Image (cartoon, grey):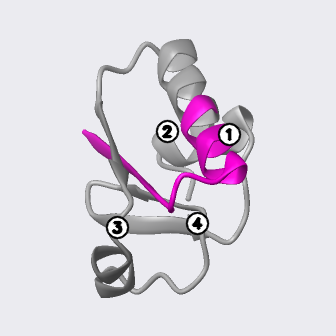
Amino acid sequence: MKIQILGTGCPKCKMLEKNAREALHLLGIRAEVEKVTDLNEIMNMGVMITPAIAVDGTVKSAGKVLTKEQISEILRGGN
């Protein structure tokens, strides 16, 4: 599994990354977490507002900081 945090490194992007790592830890899932900061790459993924999170190349949320509980739900396949 590959988790991508899309954003320029702002505080909201950092919080989303922190929450994603915590969700992975809580669920006991091993995954690669990648930060994507290149705006062209972010836009190529269809994201126009950050922060955003993608799982295995599919954007799951954009424009908000998901909680670790919300991310856990996504990782369990609920979204």
* Residue at the spot of label 3: 58
Query: In the image, what residue type sits under mark 2?
Result: Arg
Q: Which residue is mark 2?
A: 76
Mark 2 or mark 4, earlier in chain: 4
Q: Which residue is mark 4?
A: 61
Residue sitting at x 30%, y 20%? 30
Mark 1 or 4, nearer chain start: 1
Q: Would you name the residue on which mark 1 appears?
A: 15
Asked whether disc 1 touches disc 2, contact meaning CB atoms under 8 Å apart, the reply is no
Camera-nearest label, 1 or 2: 1
Amino acid marked by disc 4: Ser
- Pick whichever, 6 or 69, lies toward us: 6
Please give the name of the residue rendered at 54% of the width and 48% of the height, measured from the top-left corner. Answer: 74
The residue under the point 54% across, 52% down is 9
Q: Secondary structure at mark 4?
A: strand
What secondary structure is found at the residue carrying circle 2? loop
Helix or strand or loop: what does disc 3 sit on? strand
| Category of crowding for the residue at label 2, using alpha-carbon neighbours closer than 10 angstroms: few (below 14), some (14–19), many (at least 20) | few
Q: CA distance from mark 2 to mark 3?
A: 15 Å
- SS of the residue under disc 1: helix
Please give the range of residues in magenta: 1-18
Look at the image and say whether residue 70 sits in the magenta stretch: no
Label 3 close to label 1 by CB (< 8 Å) = no
> Is residue 64 rendered to the left or right of residue 32?
right
Mark 3 or mark 1: name the one nearer the start of the chain: 1
Q: Amino acid at mark 3?
A: Thr
| Marks 1/2: CA–CA distance | 20 Å
Q: Amino acid at mark 1?
A: Met
Percent across and percent down for residue 68 are 68, 33
- The location of residue 15, given as percent across then percent down, is 68, 39
Q: Is residue 28 above or below residue 14?
A: above
